[in-house]
């Protein structure tokens, strides 16, 4: 990312499928602090068409951890309706930074070792992790690469499973326990606005597992947003 940009540089427009308050607002604030040279706007997907400028380039970054086809289609329609010629980037994942942030969220709850290099002789607080997602089996397939990256970081089995459809986390827990894993944890691969409040807690309680917090405004999310914007500048 350049340290300075011309006044007519493309806007960075964050498109959120949820409310612009709360976690989305926090992410936008982190991006502004980390990259003050970028003009950042935050819009809901439904308000996107009316907010894109017609006389200035814009880069629209979806606040999604996977390519949700429904949301991405809505963003595409909004951009087309605006007539602005704005460019839409891919979703933020899969990416190693997502796996790093998921690892940190687990460690914050005492569900993973914070440093897998220096603490190799210390027993892991969990035997396996379920990478929880929302959006049905399409979402599960989309986050498989992130599950592999997280498993590599934790040196533990990681299975992706849906928290809002069947087969879901119950089947994943059954498979992991059948393989000998007793202590399970759910790592939600979501920013936080993708599902109703309590979704993660209910999924964890149903299988007697611990759970981490959603990714939220973790610095990795802000960094992925900036990288997505920067990659469009390069082209």
Image: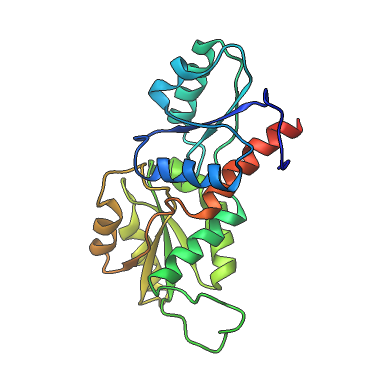
Where in the figure is residue 188, as x and y percent of width and height? 40, 55
Q: Quadrant of residue 153?
A: bottom right
Which of these two is toward me, 195 or 138? 195
Q: Residue at x 57, y 53 (%)?
A: 145
Which of these two is toward me, 112 or 155? 112
Which of these two is toward me, 15 or 120? 15
Q: Residue at x 51, y 72 (%)?
A: 156
Where in the figure is residue 48, as x and y percent of width and height? 45, 21
In the displayed structure, 215 sits above or below 83; it is below
Q: Residue at x 27, y 65 (%)?
A: 207
Which of these two is toward me, 16 or 202? 16
Taking the image as shown, residue 3 lies to the left or right of residue 168, namely: right
Taking the image as shown, residue 25 lies to the left or right of residue 234, namely: left
Taking the image as shown, residue 156 lies to the left or right of residue 229, namely: left
Where in the figure is residue 225, as x and y percent of width and height? 57, 42
Quadrant including the N terminus: top right
In the displayed structure, 120 sits above or below 11; it is below
Q: Residue at x 55, y 38 (%)?
A: 91
Seen from this angle, which residue lies furthest bottom? 121
Where in the figure is residue 52, as x and y percent of width and height? 52, 18
Count the labels in the image.
Answer: 0
Taking the image as shown, residue 231 lies to the left or right of residue 185, namely: right
Quadrant including the C terminus: top right
The colour scheme of the drawn protein is: rainbow
């Amino acid at each position: 990312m350049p340290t300075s940009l011309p006044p007519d540089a493309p806007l960075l427009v964050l498109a959120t499928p949820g409310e612009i308050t709360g976690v989305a607002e926090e992410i936008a604030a982190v991006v502004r602090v980390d990259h003050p040279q970028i003009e950042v706007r935050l819009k809901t997907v439904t308000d996107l068409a009316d907010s894109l400028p017609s006389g200035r380039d814009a880069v629209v970054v979806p606040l999604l951890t996977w390519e949700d086809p429904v949301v991405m289609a809505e963003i595409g329609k909004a951009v087309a309706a605006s007539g602005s010629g704005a460019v839409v980037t891919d979703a933020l994942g899969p990416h190693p930074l997502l796996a790093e942030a998921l690892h940190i969220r687990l460690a914050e709850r005492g569900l993973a070792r914070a440093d897998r290099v220096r603490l190799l002789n210390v027993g892991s607080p969990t035997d396996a992790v379920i990478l929880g997602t929302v959006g049905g089996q399409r979402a599960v397939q989309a986050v498989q690469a992130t599950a592999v990256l997280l498993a590599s970081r934790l040196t533990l089995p990681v299975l992706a499973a849906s928290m809002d459809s069947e087969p879901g986390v119950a089947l994943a827990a059954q498979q992991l326990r059948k393989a000998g894993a007793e202590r399970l944890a759910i790592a939600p691969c979501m920013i936080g606005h993708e599902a109703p409040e309590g979704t993660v807690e209910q999924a964890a309680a149903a299988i007697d597992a611990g759970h981490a917090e959603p990714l939220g405004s973790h610095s990795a999310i802000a960094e992925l947003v900036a990288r997505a914007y920067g990659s469009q500048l390069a082209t």
